[in-house]
Amino acid sequence: MLSVLMLRIMKLRNEWMLFLMMIAMTLVFSTVFGFTLSQGHSPKILIVDKDKTEYSQILIDELSKDEIFEYEFANYEDAVKMVDENKALSAVIIEDDFSEKIKNGKKTTLNILKVKENRELMIFENLLSKTTAKIAGNINIAEIITNYITENGSEDKIEIFNKAYTRMSKGLKYRRPLMIEKEIFNSSNNRYDNYKHLVIGLMLFFSMYTMVFGIGEILNERKYNTWQRQLVSPLSKFSILLGNMVYTLIIGMVQISILILFSKYIFRVEWGSSIGGILLVAFGFTFSVTSLGLLLSGIVKTHGQLSAITPVVLTSTSMLGGCMWPLEIVNSKILLALANITPQKWAIEGMERIAMYGQGFESVLFPTLVLFMMGIIFLGVGTKLVKFE
Amino acid sequence: MTLLEIRNLKKYFKNVKAVDDISFRVNKGEIFGLLGPNGAGKSTTISMISTLIKPTSGEILYKGESIVKKPSIIQKKLGVVPQDIALYPDLTGYNNLKFWGHSYGLRGKLLNKRIDEVSEIIGLKDKLKKKVNEYSGGMKRRLNIGAALLHKPELLIMDEPTVGIDPQSRNHILDTVLKLNKQGMTIIYTSHYMEEVEYVCSRISIMDNGKIIAMGTKDELIDIIKGQKKISLKFDEFSEDVVEKIKGIESVKDAYILDDEIIISTENGETIFKDIITEVSTTNSSITSIDIQKPNLETVFLHLTGKSLRD
């Protein structure tokens, strides 16, 4: 193993420019996105409340709980003007029959004013859809309770309904995971942060190339006939693979660590209180992607073929796994289920738990375990597919 | 003393019999040649001896122990010079030797000493700081050999080590082979160049279509065609029917075109000239020279297979 490790280090002396370019590219992309999505900026959503009842207020209160967007009341004319002039991302029109429809269980439509589709708007639409569904659910349950109580003697149906709804809302609030409550008290940064998400996503996305091509070097060994020469030497197959794996793991970890340090000290990205947790997830991710690289190297025959399929595999799984946008904007259950089989999803989840939501080391144990399990499966299949001749 | 023994070795790739039931022994201290045209099965045999591929059946014994069952027996004792250059083009000659030496367990001062000695043997001492992709074909071939010598192997396998190089480098390699053998190294040398095998090998095995068709010393092999002569005719130009006309002569066993010559096999050396000249004169061909050649391995191969080594 030491021989292979020594070989790879000797080769790195010739390839260090490429290695630095991959790091630089990630930093450039992070900077570009950083300027466009500057940290702390909350897109403005206008609310045109024509209903002005306690139900429309419930909706506004529920929306405001999520701190991604800044909400402001406006009349319809101002809302149209501001959205048109790009002074607001969007406007939600709560029609005057909102409360009636929602109380009677009728289909409620919320109109949204928008100039163009973008990622933030997709996040907002998803949030609005979830919030209205939640309110409608609460109302339904409150309705059932009210009917039950009034059928058993009480006459004041409206009062009972209102009390039941309030209890439902409170009940749901208390049943929320404890971590969210903790998050509120911890700091002002413990909310979704687009820039941070992109830094993490792009860092993982670009580092994957280094890892896949790092282990894919075994295909170049075959091209230069050195693979066969290694196989007839006293180096065992296990030590040849292990040497290449260890080298790629080290290179992957070094790259991610440099990117974390750069983003922390140059772009002022806060990585949370558990850097050990971040590095643990990074290690799990590096292991699973290196093993994925071995699997891909086992499927293809040449380094050229690996170069052709790698961007396809890495880009599609990165999109699926949420490197380019948050999975919160994805509604498709199939896509969300597929995201679970990408290492990117678990790495982002683990890192964001610490860097974005202020959780501790223990919060990354499960995502890291999943990453290691994936790595073991990829490694097992990859080892079978690699041709040792 | 037998160093390596091959018993009924077979290697089939689907329906192709690459190596078909061959047996031979390599004695300690000899240069054993495997001669045969491309595709004869030499490289497949070498790949099995060097433990790169497993035989379909048969046994390979190194000092009496099966290396099919336990490849590690031979790996530390074996040096392999592959047919294709197996070096890292982006690394210097020195770093290439350093890695291959390291992979055979050499470390520190011993490794540096051996790199020094080997670079002297292969004549690249002052070229080691250059990257391999800046080397000429001959220099790469020599470094390719050097990488197999670092750990002082007991058995050195050289698979077509002179393919595609200039005569100067070729001579250097052949002399190196003889020098290493004098120092006690056992060598298996494969080639489709008859002259090389004749020059360096003490015993030769001729392979064709996966089988060994003859084996022995050079003299023993030539004895197979005792009495046969090879005549080469050179022409200014010759018509297509001249070969057929020559084949029609009673004492001619075979005739074929090789480059710009016509080669004739016969048991009737000098007396056949008259018949040849008579037949050639009936065509639109004019002979510029006639040469009677001594029998060699090429003639032996032709006699045994009916085709040229270069076919």
Image (tube, coloured by chain):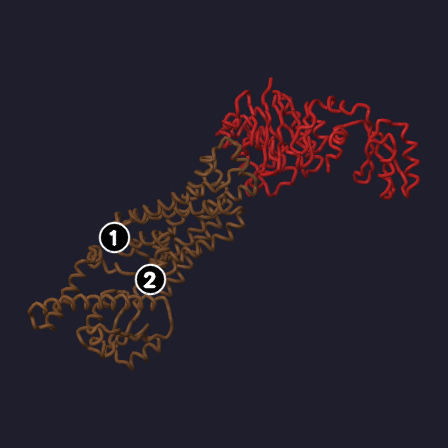
Chain colours: A brown, B red
Q: Amino acid at mark 1?
A: Gln
Q: Residues within 10 Å of mark 1 (few under 14, many from 20)?
A: many
Dot 2 falls on which chain? A
Query: For residue A381, which numbered disc appears in the image?
Result: none
> Which quadrant is home to the N terminus of chain A?
top left
Which residue corresponds to the image point at 54% horizontal and 31% vertical from the top-left? B51
Residue A69: name its quadrant: bottom left
**How many marks can you see?**
2
Query: Which residue of the protein is positioned furthest toward the bottom in this rendering?
Result: A77
Asked whether residue B125 appears in the rendered view, the answer is no
SS under mark 1:
loop
Report which quarter residue A103 is drawn in.
bottom left
The picture places residue B19, in percent across and down from the top left corner, at 62, 32
- Pinpoint the chain carrying mark 1: A
A140 or B45, nearer to the observer = A140
Q: In the image, residue B167 lies at what x, y percent?
A: 72, 35
Q: Does residue B237 appear to the left or right of A90 in the view shown?
A: right
Instruction: Name the residue rendered at 62%, 22% in the picture.
Output: B25
Residue at point 38%, 73% (across, down): A116
Identified by mark 2, the residue type is: Asn
Task: Name the outermost residue toward the front.
Answer: A151
Q: CA distance from mark 1 to mark 2?
A: 18 Å
Res A266 quadrant in image: bottom left
Identify the residue position indicated by label 1 in the image: A359
In terms of depth relative to the viewer, which is nearer, B141 or A167? A167
Determine which residue is flagged by label 2: A194
Residue B290 is left or right of residue A128, and the answer is: right
- The answer to whether one can see residue B43 in this image is yes
Q: Position of residue A311 (x, y in %)?
A: 47, 55
